[in-house]
Structures are given as C-alpha cells and as structure tokens.
Image (cartoon, rainbow, N blue to C red):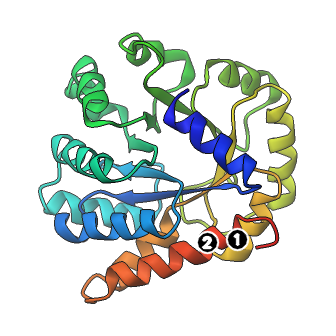
Amino acid sequence: MTPIERKFRELKEKQEKALVGFVSAGDPDMDKSFDLLCAMIESGLDVLELGIPFSDPTADGPVIQRSSMRALKNGVTISKVLDMTQRLKASYDIPIILFTYYNLIFRFPSADFYERSVEAGADGVLVVDLPVEESDELTCYFKNGDFCLIHLIAPTTDENRMKMIAEKGSGFLYLISMTGVTGGKGLETGLTAEKAKMLKKHTRLPVCTGFGISTPEHVREVAAFSDGVVIGSAFEKTIEENADSADLAGIIARQTRSFKQATRKGG
C-alpha cells in the first residue's frame, strides 16, 4: 500500500476528508518555507503539494504566480525542492506530491527526475501541462507502483474523456472546480458535485477538488462530495501578506487548523 492509499484509508476510517495543501517551495525564503511547511503538517495537513517554481505557471493565478517568482529569485531549483522533500520526509509521515510543469521535468531530464524524486521520498507528481495522451513518456520510467502521476479533470471534461483519465490515474484524481486559473472566484459547488458524482462512477481512486476554495465554509461544502479538498492560493496569500511577520509559521498553522477542522464530520 502506498503512503497516499494509506492516508486516504486512515481518513475514511476517521470519517474525515483530506486537506491537501499547495505551497511554492522557497517562498518567502528557503528557511521560512521549511518552517511553515512543518507548521502546516503539525497542524493537520494530510497531503502536501510542494510547488516547484516555474517562470511561466500558466495554470496559476496571480497569487501563486507571484509566489513562484519570489522562489525563483531565491534561487530555488528542482534539486533544492527535492532536498526539502527529503528533509520533510525524515521528520513527517505525510504524502508529498511535487507540483510542476513538464518543461522542467523534460530538461532535468525525465528519467533522472523520477529517480531523484523517489530517492527524496516524494510519492508522486502533478504535471499541469502533461495531457493524459502523452503521459506515457514520463510514466514509462516509473517502477513498482512507488510513484504516482496525479491527473487533472477539468470542469469541461466530458464523461468519455473522464473515464479515460480515470483509467490512467493513480494516487488520487484532481477535479478542478471551475474554469480559469487558481485562486479565481465563482466556486459552483452544485455543478462540481455533479462532476464528482460522474467521475466516481469510473474510478475507485479518491477524488480531490481544488481551485477557488479559500474559506472553511468552502471546505465544508466541497468535502460533502469529495474525498479531499485542495487549497493553494489561500495559503500563498497568507504567506505573501505576512512574509515579514515573526509569527508567519503560527499564522499559517492556525489557518491550516481551521481548514482541517472543516474536513471533519460535524466540523
């Protein structure tokens, strides 16, 4: 059983949904980034999406774009993100998904990226711009089911394509709740709930929903029909607004606890 499978099974037994949190590695700097990630994990984060900064993050809204630019200015590279992953894994038993764009993996190159990621303890990767039809050029290097490629399902994905993506999926499936980029407004939980119901007909994998989720109330609404809730821009907005605060880790810890409580039954 993979760490991702184990985590979702444990949560199901506790009647909780997964809190999946995205943070750009190295924002606002490497030391503070590591400290706030530790604070989030200790405050109830279930799955970490660790963003590898990229100069052209086309799927991300302005908040995450700025976080990526700050990290790049700090000299953050894939190797440094993998070093951070290894440090986190040495202290915490939490699934870590690397979040990136395919250009970075391709140039690393792909085989080395896989080997280094597994060596660091990462449990999978989410590649925003790698369509399922072309994913074999990355997954051909995967061995023993020890590393997952997390696939995205867009709001505009029809049922036939949804089924195809589900059949290629591993770890969990990421259902995007709205058209546009991360951090946008206009969360339509009714429509997304119907998409989640349709998707679950074609998979036994957990379904996690993200984009536009920024409050505990949003979390409660989405947790009603999803196995997990993905939050990124809300965390990065907090980091951006409190980057110079001596209590940044404490602020992010309190925010994490409030989101996590909303994933619990009756929370």
Residue depicted at 38% across the width and 70% down the height: 39
Q: Which of the image's four quarters has the N terminus?
A: top right
Is the residue 135 above or below the residue 177 in the image? above
Q: Circle 2: is it few (<14), some (14-19), or many (20+) Cα within 10 Å?
A: many
Label 1 sits on residue? 262
* Amino acid at pointer 1: Ala
Residue depicted at 44% across the width and 13% down the height: 144
Residue depicted at 26% across the width and 27% down the height: 113
Q: Position of residue 115 (x, y in %)?
A: 26, 22
| Disc marking residue 61 | none
What element does badge 2 sit on? Answer: helix
Q: Residue furthest left?
A: 75
Is the residue 208 above or below the residue 116 in the image? below
Q: What separation in Å lies between label 1 and label 2 (alpha carbons)?
A: 5 Å
Q: Is residue 177 left or right of residue 138?
A: right
Q: Circle 1: is it few (<14), some (14-19), or many (20+) Cα within 10 Å?
A: many
Residue 112 shows in this picture: yes
Q: Position of residue 264 (x, y in %)?
A: 73, 65
Q: Position of residue 64 (x, y in %)?
A: 40, 63
Label 2 sits on residue? 259
What element does badge 1 sit on? Answer: helix
Q: Is residue 254 left or right of residue 202?
A: left
Q: Nearer the viewer, residue 198 or 95?
A: 95
Is the residue 62 above or below the residue 224 in the image? below
Q: Is residue 195 left or right of residue 94?
A: right
- Asked if disc 1 and disc 2 are in contact, CB closer than 8 Å, the reply is yes
Quarter holding residue 62: bottom left
* Amino acid at pointer 2: Phe
Q: Position of residue 139 (x, y in %)?
A: 43, 16
Q: Which of the image's four quarters has the C terminus?
A: bottom right
Quarter holding residue 262: bottom right
Q: Nearer the viewer, residue 68 or 93?
A: 93
